[in-house]
Image (cartoon, coloured by chain):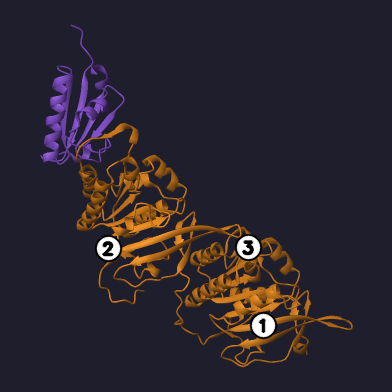
Chain colours: A purple, B orange
Amino acid sequence: MPKKEKWELRLYIAGQTPKSILALQNITKYCKQHLAGQYSIQVIDLLKNPQLAEGDQIFAIPTLVRKFPEPIRKIIGDLSNEEKVLVGLNIRPLTI
Amino acid sequence: MAKTKTTFRKTPTGISGLDEITNGGFPKGRPVLICGSAGCGKTLFATQFLIKGITEYNEPGVLMSFEETTADIKQNVKSLGFDLDTLIAQKKLRVDYVRIERSEIEETGEFDLEGLFIRLNHAIDSIGAKRVVLDTIESLFSGMDNMALLRSEIRRLFQWLKEKGVTAIITGEKGENTLTRQGLEEYVSDCVILLDFRVINQIATRRLRIVKYRGSTHGTNEYPFLIDEEGISVIPVTSLKLDYKSSTEIISTGLPALDKLFSGGGIYRAGSTLITGTAGTAKTILASYFAISSCKRKESVLYFSFEESPDQLGRNMATIGINFKSPVKSNLLHIHASRPSLQGLEMHLLMILRLVEKFKPRTVIIDPISSLISIGTTSEVRGMLVRLMDTLKTKQINALFTSLTHQQSGESREITVDAVSSLADTWIDMQNIVKEDGHIRTLHIVKARGMGHANTEQPFYITDKGIQFPTTKK
């Protein structure tokens, strides 16, 4: 089976705050549904690695960054609006 | 300098003149808001605060820019002689460019600006920063939808900066009826400074005003400031104190015959002397005598010539036996020539003060001061002259000004005389009197503070040996 496009996502959080936990739950759920088997989510806790904030131009928490496929997209917030997240990540148009 | 009882500590701003107006600088460990319209010098102001903080007060600083990229900022301040790369390499400065690109950001659900806090905190801690600049935080508003959240987060940020104990400058663009577009002044209430840029009579003037400074006395006027190759300098207009020392030492005017007309045998050191007269009454010659006499005492002279080039001045004086070449060579005499119309009045004052600072002369000559008058209004000119004379007096410098007057006492005569004469300690008026057989040159002493003087008009001739008084010839 030819390897499909892989989605590389990064979620920036600052400690285990309710917003961060919610965001992680949400994105995991959406990915399982829509991108099963072709995604990776890397969680970066800026409290532990503050130096990483600059690289991806993070200012809001939580922020989800789509590193791949390009171009880079960012979604800030707890990702509670599924529609918006899917459109924002460009996953949505496939399944309407 | 600060006369106030220090109730809280201040941070020197590194902007020349501003510490004087603020009685010592910005409130230490608190945020300061700098606002003004586009192009008024906010970013430069903030950057200079950081750089001088590092180079002069050894306080590392963080610059968080929301508008210009790091490369742009480096480039911009390079023209002012600031090299950011070196400071960054020495771990004294951190520049963090926060890029907020609306098109690539989507908002959904709740969030906060903790990312920004973490970035800032990391930057501050990594170099032990004492100073922080946020330029311009209002950019966040254009990049985000949730205004209510943004406002509460910005409020939290300023509070956090206070707790962090850093002295911060926050810049903001001027709004239509408010100091800043987003009303940042509501959050930063300790110290607010407004910068302004206008063009009057085709000459650009920049002004600074302290709108608010909680818990501290400060100057309330609008102060002109300049941006030149050395960064920003503020000119404190009204920081005038009449508390300079008065010398009792007598110095020569350079002409023994003229000295004799004063009961003291000369004029007081560190006084200001005004020479007025219509065109061609030998004002510059008298000024040159004064310069040479200072050189003879081995006291350096700074000569501002607003009408003649140094070369021309030297040539002309040589024809009447005054030698400018050797004192110039031995660095006792510096001649600085420029056209008054090239710069605004403040620029002139600053240039004069800078050169005075650089050469540390004991005598300053401005020839003629009346040409400066053409570039400003009466009150501006007077203000400037007061500042200038005061500064020179405080530094114990002998000052001599020439001033051109007109035969018909027109308005400009009024201005010159009004502006200068009351400030001058000694006033010599020179005239060309028409007689049947031609002109006769005369001079007379209008006033000499603190000493008696001759009251008659003294005729004199200009020969190839200089000024000659007939009465002194035996």
- Pick the front one: B134 or A93: A93
Answer left or right for B254 relative to B93.
right
Q: Name the residue under label 2.
A: B28
Reading the image, the residue beneath label 3 is: B340
What's the distance in space between the residues labelled 2 and 3, CA to CA? 40 Å
Q: Tell me if residue B403 can be seen.
A: yes
Nearest to N terminus: mark 1 or mark 2: 2
Q: Which of marks 2 and 3 is nearer the N terminus?
A: 2
Alpha carbon distance from label 3 to label 1: 24 Å
Of labels 1 and 2, the one closer to you: 2
- Left or right of B467: which side holds B46? left
The answer to whether residue B404 is visible is no
Left or right position of B192 against B395: left
What's the residue type where badge 2 is placed? Lys
In the depicted view, which residue is nearer to us: B60 or B140?
B140
**Where residue B102 appears, x then y in whole percent?**
33, 36
